[in-house]
Amino acid sequence: MWKLMALTTIVALLTTASGCGGGGEFDERGERYRVRGTVRLDGLAVSRARLVFTNLDGDTKVRATGLIEGGFYDIPADFGPLAGLNGVEIQPELLELEEFEQKRAATPGGKVSAEAVDLPAKFRLRSNLTASVVADPSKDDSSQVNRFHFELESKK
């Protein structure tokens, strides 16, 4: 009897861990999807920042974050946003202590920003950027679905 209960528990755990199919990863708030793409500011790749997707559909606000490095980001389905319309924010990432000290030593007066990239406030909180994430059943890495490219201009 205990063997049957143990087997039933294992099967239930494996079923829950594998998600519900459809290409996304199941979360109690909904299915999450992989998103990836590029971020450029004034024509140049954003060296390092944090991208934040927040779903705008539904009652629960689910946030998905990923790191932008060298102008590219790739948020796996495990941590990705929900399908539907998402607000997008781009938050500056702070410099590592060594980078900060090097930058400060090279600057007359020693006053420097601790942020890796100087991003205009309009792309941070209360950003107008959006992305429509689709429920993508494809697991094909070459798929163009849920690839978002953000071309930002600081002067506009």
Image (cartoon, grey):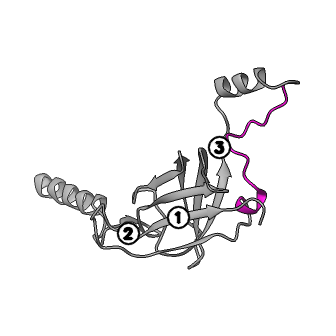
> Which residues fall within the magenta stretch?
110-124
Residue 112 located within the stretch drawn in magenta: yes
> The N terminus is located in which quarter?
bottom left
Q: Earlier in the sequence, mark 3 or mark 2?
A: 3
Mark 2 lies on residue: 144
Mark 1 lies on residue: 149
Left or right? Give the position of 6 relative to 104. Answer: left
Residue shown at the point (68%, 44%) measured from the top left: 117
Q: Earlier in the sequence, mark 3 or mark 1?
A: 3
Distance CA(mark 3)–CA(mark 2): 27 Å
Q: Quadrant of residue 55?
A: bottom right
Q: Quadrant of residue 26?
A: bottom left
Q: Nearer the viewer, residue 149 or 136?
A: 149
Left or right? Give the position of 7 relative to 97. Answer: left
In the image, farthest residue toward the right: 109
Q: Residue 122, labelled with which disc?
A: none
Q: Position of residue 130 (x, y in %)?
A: 60, 72
Residue shown at the point (59%, 69%) measured from the top left: 61
In the image, farthest residue toward the front: 43
Amino acid type, residue under disc 3 in the picture: Glu
Q: Secondary structure at mark 3?
A: loop
Residue 42 located within the stretch drawn in magenta: no
| Contact? badges 3 and 1 (CB < 8 Å) | no
Q: Residue 93, labelled with which disc?
A: 3
Left or right? Give the position of 141 relative to 47. Answer: left
- Dot 2, crowdedness within 10 Å: few (<14), some or many (≥20)? few
